[in-house]
Amino acid sequence: MNHIKGYIGIDIGSISTKGVIMDEENHMIASEYIWTEGDPIKATKNIIETFKKTLEEKEIKVDIYGIGTTGSARNLIGTILNANVIKNEITAHAIGTLNTFPDARTILEIGGQDSKLIIIRNGIVVDYAMNTLCSAGTGSFLSSQAKRLGVTIEEIGDIALTSRNPSKIAARCTVFAESDLVHKAQIGHSKEDLIAGICNSVVKNYLNNLAKGKVLEDKIVFQGGVSKNKGVVKAFEDILNKKVHVDKNSHLMGAIGIAIISKNVNKNGNKLEFDFNLQNVEFKTIGTECNGCSNTCEIVKVYKDNELIEKMGGRCEKGNQISNIV
Amino acid sequence: MLGNYYIPIYNFLNNIVDQEIVEVLMPNKMSNETIVEGSKFSPDFACIPFKYNMGNYLSELKKGANVLIQAGGGCRYGYYFEVQEQTLKDMGYDFTFISLLGENGLNIKELYHKFKLLNAKLSFSTFCYQGALAIAIIKIMDDFETYMRDKYNLQIDSKSFDTIHKKMLQDILQINTLAKLYQFKDEYIKKLKAVALRKITKDDIKIGIVGELFTSMEPFSSFYLEKELLNYNCIVKRYTTVTYLLLQKRFSRKKVMKKASEYIDYHFGADGAETIAHTLELIEEEYDGIIHIKPFGCSPEINAMPILQKISRQKNIPIMYLTFDEQTTATGVKTRIEAFYDMLKMKKEQEKESREEAYESY
């Protein structure tokens, strides 16, 4: 049994956590997609556990040469896994997509709580936008409205496709969208029209917020959790009047990207210390307030088996000197 | 309290009052507390400077201040002090409010009478002399910091500038005459020039900051945007300084319009037109990226944004837009800054490769 070189990429988002192991040729060896459920450490442990099982089943021995983390919990998980690269999700998504679609020029990404638009020319990012103030054009809006209509988030796409006459639903703001939706439901619009209407409103909100003044050129790639929703894909195609490409791994692009970056960063080609038996290691985080000045930075102390491994969140040296006592 | 500008104001006040009767309070640094306390007593939709102001006033009033001073400004900021004064008085505080700008802008005579409240013996000549001194100090501080932003990533020992800067801010507090100031200036120019620098190369990333003045100048309100960029080894240029607002802006209005004439026909309040003109200037100077910052709801800058988007498209330059309000987590801002930097860096690397290919083909 040969040992091969592997690179782990973990993308810990607000709603879901994505993990992949890539080989040296940027092919995926293992992947996993689970809900974060407000506990990024547990989610990561579960992902690593799944990796272990997958590798055992496939009878592959992997030596880890790169570990990368991205997404909103990237710093915390990066510390825990001792990652060799911790990077923002915009760069990670761009790199991941270019691996699958080298000729992509526009990346639409809608995740659980944020959305991004990345413009690519000649294989590099030249411009991007990320929603700032509101989550109207994101996955969490879709899931809360699905709940209101009594369908699961997974069903939305198929139901939306059956609609012939999507309801018009305000796209500016979630609050208005919701009252619009309730109103349309009460005057008798059918469920599929309402659902298709929500999908359209997500797309309109996205385009109004992020695509202002930007030129969306072919090839357009759509990814992030919401790209699994066929209703939203169709809404994008109808509104943009262009083909929108969705890869079967579209939800994993951030993780793929960060795994590839971790490979590129490890130029010396040194093997990293990594143990797949993470389940038995106890990680604990304690949040405290630094009282060094009136800023009261929120310091998070990370313990591995009761041993302090990192303090994060301080803006100055004082935060790092905060006492080590639990 | 705005960036380090409390120093010249503090100096000025100490020099014009009788220090045995009047105590000048050193303002607290901006902190989470400022914004949390300030927002409690501010209208939700007033822009962020209003809330910081309130936080500052409250912390000083609690220390016992009975005279507050505010600068005033060119947009709705100009009306803020009246609302703030009323709000604070309704809360039961008793104090006198001095606004540096009057109804018709800056009027020295009017201002002199306002400050006479603090010291009945204050002569007009002393007032003017100390005013000029304060402005001279501001100018020196701004020049110092502008130089630092421009050269920060070129210093060989990464701590040199910070050390001198820190020392300068301490020393400048002792200055009370122009003669001392000039001696001080010479000394620090020498120190600055003595910092060992490497040569600038085509691979250095240059980023310009344009936009609203408060978020530009108060680092806390932009989550230390500039510091963050400097730590990524970028060359940073920012136009808005107090020197610029006080001394240069009024004389450059025509120049600004001329520069931006392709896009706008008239000034639209505060620094809107300046934002456009400065963006165009940065592009001419081959800056790699531009960051536009504003508080939430800042109408002059919102008006400037569609024009910036057009410029970005036509001139092919990335512009990132950041909006600040009373949120307290820096992660979102950091993510965007890092991504912006990564993007510019990738661009540079590609340019470098194509340059090298061009060489090889010879």
Image: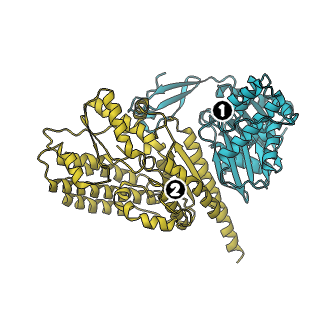
Chain colours: A cyan, B yellow
What residue would you read off at disc 1? A176
Q: Quarter-wise, where is residue B195 in the image?
A: bottom left
Q: Is residue B156 visible?
A: no
Q: Residues within 10 Å of mark 2 (few under 14, many from 20)?
A: many
For residue B29, side relative to residue A5 (left or right): left
Task: Kindly identify which chain the residue marked by label 2 belongs to.
Answer: B
Residue A108 x/y as whole percent: 73, 46
Give the residue displayed 64% in from the left and 65% down from the top: B352
Task: Kindly identify which chain the residue marked by label 1 belongs to.
Answer: A
- Image quadrant containing the N terminus of chain A: top right
Q: Which element carries disc 2, helix, strand or loop? A: loop
For residue A228, side relative to residue B14 (left or right): right
Give the residue displayed 69% in from the left and 34% down from the top: A112
Cα–Cα span, label 2 and label 1: 42 Å
Q: Amino acid at mark 2?
A: Cys
The label number, if any, that marks residue B234 in the structure image: 2
Give the residue displayed 64% in from the left and 63% down from the top: B314
Q: Which-is-in-front pick, marks 2 and 1?
A: 1
Q: Residue furthest bottom?
A: B362
Residue A45 x/y as whole percent: 69, 27
For residue B8, side relative to residue B342 (left or right): left
Q: Amino acid at mark 1?
A: Phe
Residue B92 x/y as whole percent: 29, 26
Above-or-below relation of B226 to B237: above
Above-or-below relation of B34 to A152: below
Q: Residues within 10 Å of mark 1 (few under 14, many from 20)?
A: some
Q: Is residue A288 visible?
A: yes
Mark 2 in CB contact with mark 1 (< 8 angstroms): no
Residue A150 x/y as whole percent: 78, 22
**Mark 2 and mark 1, same subunit?**
no
